[in-house]
Image (cartoon, rainbow, N blue to C red):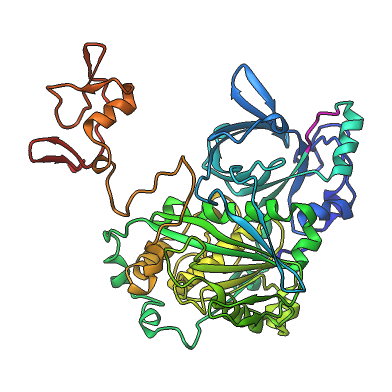
Amino acid sequence: MRFVLWNLINLLVIWSNGGVRADGTHKVKRRIDLSEEEINIYTNHQHIEDYDIFSPTFHKSAIHKRSIDSLPAHPRNHEIKFSAFGDEFHLKLERNVWLQRRGLTVDRLGDDGVIQRERLVDGDCHYYGKLISHSKASSASISTCKGLRGVISHGDSEFYIKPLEHHHANRIRRDSDNRHANPHIIYKRIFAKLRKTTPQEQEQPTEFCASEDPESSNSEIGNYTRAPSTMMSSMEDVYIGQKYLEFMVMIDKSMVEFHGDDVINYTMTLMNIVSRRFAEPSLGVSMRLAITKFIILDTDTPMVQSITGHNISLNVQANGPQLLEEFCRWQAGFNPIHDAHPEHWDIATLITRKDLFKLSGTYRDTNLLGRAYIGTTCQRSLQCSVNQDDGLTTGSVIAHETGHNLNLHHDPDYGCNNGHHVMSSARPVGVESFKWSVCSAQQIKIFLTNRLSSCLNDAPSIDDPEVDLLVVNDLPGRRYTLRAQCQLAYGASSAVCSQSVCGSLGCQEGGFCHYSGIMIMEGTTCAPNKVDLRIQ
């Protein structure tokens, strides 16, 4: 759903002091007065409830804190605090080590057909997390590359965070006499504000995507499009195993022109939001997202050499349906054939600033932000989507379109409530927007048990010392012996106690046996002819 343009007549009044408005809501005291035009730089004309300015602080402990810009590296875990909207926010974050492998490069395609390859130098700055300062459920996708970017979902609200533009930040630093201030903008959207006001509009929420069932799609997938409830319920206890989504991400010239030098950080932030959606437990399957190919277009008519040695071109100015078709055909031409190739991808996504509505040429697509084929993830010439950049909420659109690629239809098509979860036909807001409906969770299991989803079994080549790729369905105890587990717990000199039994780990260190309650890892051979499988 294309967001209703924000009426800023009342919302853009800046108060110099806190207090209460006539409607009973609290005024927000801000440190900078932004015009309507300046606000739109950050919100992309989206309907928002309010905004504030803050400077985040990284907290390593209660007695040790420093600004975001002073961090020497990106730690595995972050705790960040800031004040906004008269409230205190405390984020606890864990690094997303899967999003990109070390050594991932960016290919820039120019008018002359020459490819310039540059290495992504800052890939350890993307995090998942939650608010530990608030009691209600929350979820966050935050990137810390050159400031904070991302989204926090809490209750029925979503908070979007971006660093202030340099000229706005300098105004803050001048006014506060603090040249080290690192000001950011945070703006809030509330679910209730997106609801239509008339009963007719409530019954027919505006859709924001155009999914297509390709005629060439295998009928075997088509049979599963809207599975009967009996088939869905029978999938609840089916074990799927670990799945991997390998992505090719391409951003066009309009993205480069709009975001400038920040375009790579911005795009990686979007993909971190997508990755967080697919790591959500409500999906019912374990799915990791990794970017294996990143392309930037400096031309609207890129040309590459196909895997067969022929030159193939793309016209990014094509109309909506044709753009999807041409992009799918084009990306298939140079996608490495073998799954094991480090740059092979399962899904290709194009992100553009071009208006897909104008490109579509049809009135009914006024709010169009994404277009994708359904159930085509492992079909080389159809495994793709086209997405219009609309601010940080684009991460949700890409996740939604990727859901279509995974054979997921809109929630109301299956009888699930609309307007709440990832596969809603109307764009949802709030912590539920990070989650998948019961219908999506059931449907994706049906697709993943089909042989046409087999490309998702291949693990990406993640060159990260903190990621130890296990064989799909393997158990940690099969890779770490009892002695190895003791060495991990107590140091290299420790050994297994002679009377160690299944269940609790018993380790000898310094002449004593320690039984600290640590459980042995599942799959460990812990006694003659006995393996701990943690099955009660």
Q: What residue occupies the far front of the structure in this picture? A: 309
Indicate left or right for 244 with 247 as reference.
Answer: left
Q: Quadrant of the N terminus?
A: bottom right
Looking at the image, which is closer to me, 158 or 102?
102
The region drawn magenta spans 179-183
Q: Quadrant of the C terminus?
A: top left
State the image coordinates of residue 135 (x, y, percent, origin top left): 53, 35
Where 413 falls versus 37 (above or below)? below
Q: Residue at x 46, y 71 (%)?
A: 377
Looking at the image, which is closer to me, 260 or 279?
260
State the image coordinates of residue 384 (x, y, percent, origin top left): 55, 73
Where 362 falls versus 271 (above or below)? below
Q: Is residue 87 visible?
A: no
Q: Residue at x 50, y 84 (%)?
A: 214
Where 97 falls versus 4 (above or below)? above
Where 184 falls versus 459 (above or below)? above
Q: Looking at the magenta stretch, what is its main secondary structure? A: loop
Looking at the image, which is closer to me, 390 or 532?
532
Quarter of the image where one finds residue 511: top left
State the image coordinates of residue 2 (x, y, percent, origin top left): 70, 67
State the image coordinates of residue 392 (x, y, percent, origin top left): 68, 55
Q: What residue occupies the far left of the structure in this picture? A: 528
Q: Residue at x 28, y 58 (%)?
A: 239
